């Protein structure tokens, strides 16, 4: 009987690993439609209290520069695991809003990510041009505030409509004896190196499910 019980536990553990027991735990439900027509909301921080975290790769301090809320549609997602930055920010999300989130416009534009960079291309006949795409899309280096937030972001799929809330931050720290840093963009219209948002996320909504 002892053997049968142990076997059952092993079977349950195996099924759990296959079926996704690592899924995030919803903390609420919001049935209102996600409005992806508006620009992200960026406001001054009510507190400049630093966020201090220890990871296996080192000790890091994040300075909040702005409170940030983004409602948009996911057009690309890339995961990272190597290096200190891969531990702190294990995924990037490319998000669009405004006309870019409308299904009829999606067929004209392709989006891609690689090595923390984000690129887009549009083809002839597109109702929107370069500046509109630039100012209505962003690549977000996601820093999950909690393990549940990390799992929620991992569960996000392309074409999901999401709401993300938290802070845009600058990061400083030490990893393997050397000083490292990572800065956020505070603009939706900049390009090139440093133009991505370093986004410390404490709230995720995927369609109707809320995670905090």
Image (tube, rainbow, N blue to C red):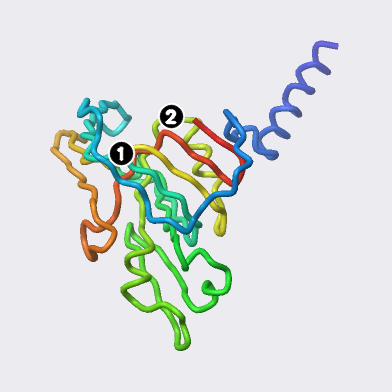
For the residues carrying marks 1 and 2, which lies nearer the camera in this image? 1
- Rendered location of residue 118, percent (x, y): 35, 64
Q: Mark 2: few, some, or many residues within 10 Å (few <14, many ≥20)?
A: few
Q: Nearer the viewer, residue 93 or 86?
A: 93
Q: Residue furthest toward the bottom?
A: 124
Q: Could you say whether the residue bearing mark 2 is in a helix, strand or loop?
A: loop
Name the mark on residue 67. Answer: 1
Identify the disc placed on residue 177: none
Q: Is residue 84 left or right of residue 12?
A: left
* Quarter location, residue 179: top left
User: Relative to residue 124, is residue 198 depicted above or below?
Assistant: above
Q: Position of residue 166 (x, y in %)?
A: 36, 37
**What quarter of the picture does the N terminus occupy?**
top right
Q: Earlier in the sequence, mark 1 or mark 2?
A: 1
Percent of width and height locating residue 37: 47, 59
In the rendered structure, find residue 146 and report the number of the disc placed on it: 2
Circles 1 and 2: CB atoms closer than 8 Å: no
């Amino acid at each position: 009987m002892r053997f049968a019980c142990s076997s059952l536990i092993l079977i349950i553990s195996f099924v759990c690993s296959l079926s996704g027991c690592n899924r995030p735990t919803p903390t609420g439900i919001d049935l209102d439609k996600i409005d992806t027509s508006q620009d992200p909301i960026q406001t001054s921080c009510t507190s400049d209290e630093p966020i201090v975290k220890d990871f296996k790769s080192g000790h890091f301090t994040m300075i909040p520069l702005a409170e940030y809320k983004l409602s948009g549609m996911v057009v690309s997602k890339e995961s990272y695991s190597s290096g200190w930055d891969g531990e702190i920010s294990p995924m990037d999300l490319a998000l669009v809003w405004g006309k870019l989130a409308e299904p009829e416009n999606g067929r004209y534009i392709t989006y891609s990510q690689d090595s923390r960079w984000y690129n887009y291309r549009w083809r002839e006949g597109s109702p929107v041009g370069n500046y509109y795409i630039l100012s209505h899309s962003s690549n977000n280096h996601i820093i999950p505030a909690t393990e549940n937030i990390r799992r929620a972001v991992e569960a996000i799929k392309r074409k999901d409509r999401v709401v993300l809330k938290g802070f845009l931050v600058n990061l400083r720290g030490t990893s393997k004896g050397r000083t490292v840093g990572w800065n956020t963009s505070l603009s939706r219209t900049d390009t090139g190196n440093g133009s991505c948002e370093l986004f410390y996320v404490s709230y995720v909504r995927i369609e109707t499910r809320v995670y905090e």
